[in-house]
Image: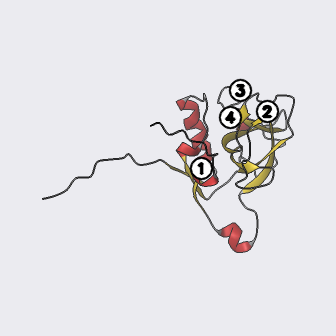
Amino acid sequence: MTVIATGRAIVSDLIAGVQTYSDDTMTNKNLLGVAVGGSTNTVGFIGQPLIWDDVAGNWDIYDGTTLTVAAALADQDNLPVLANYVVALSVGDKYGLGFNRADITLSAANTDVNMTAIYRGDATINDSGIVWGATSAPNQALFWAQLEAQQFIQSAEAAITDPSYNS
């Protein structure tokens, strides 16, 4: 019998671990409320790769073709976070970390869809938790390189192997 997944993405699908500095000092070091637009996709609120669009003044869903990491790094005059932190990952809706009640349809004209994003580490990210869509493997690699520059660590699931026994 085929099992059909009916659950929505949760934060632990994306984030394998995160530093405790923010909790220890009661500060917000990693998360940011972001306005997202520029795309016409229907998306969930957890696992979306985001990139800063300085011309539009908002964050867009990353696909590697509309806006590249190199272009975002070259044009960041209005960047609302630390310099060179031009990519992020969505981790919830406007209510905060972990909220993912329903999908939302973005539009190029509508930039008031608010998401919560993690924009800097130290955090370990599960590659399988990122919703890449049609993003090509080379563009995924460029996005990962920028994530690593922003202090994220990539985690991939281990292959499942059959156990062997010594007799």
Identify the residue under disc 1. Answer: 14
**Does label 2 or label 1 sit earlier along the sequence?**
1
Q: Nearer the viewer, mark 1 or mark 4?
A: 1
**Depth-wise, is mark 2 or mark 4 nearer the camera?**
2
Question: Residues under labels 2 and 4: Cα distance?
Answer: 13 Å
Residue occupied by mark 3: 66
The three-letter amino acid code for the residue at tag 2 is Leu
Whole-angstrom CA distance, mark 3 to mark 4, is 8 Å
CA gap, disc 3 and disc 2: 15 Å
Q: With respect to residue 138, does 127 lie above or below?
A: below
- Residue at mark 2: 106
Q: Residue at x 80, y 54 (%)?
A: 95
Residue 80 tag number: none
Location of residue 160 with respect to 110 vertically, above or below: below
Q: Position of residue 99 (x, y in %)?
A: 73, 52
- What is the x, y in percent for residue 57? 85, 38
* Amino acid tagged 3: Thr
The N terminus - image quarter: top left
| Callout 3–callout 4 Cβ contact below 8 Å | no
Estimate the x, y position of residue 164 in percent, counting from the top left.
Answer: 22, 53
Report whether residue 81 is seen: no
Q: Which residue is mark 4?
A: 62
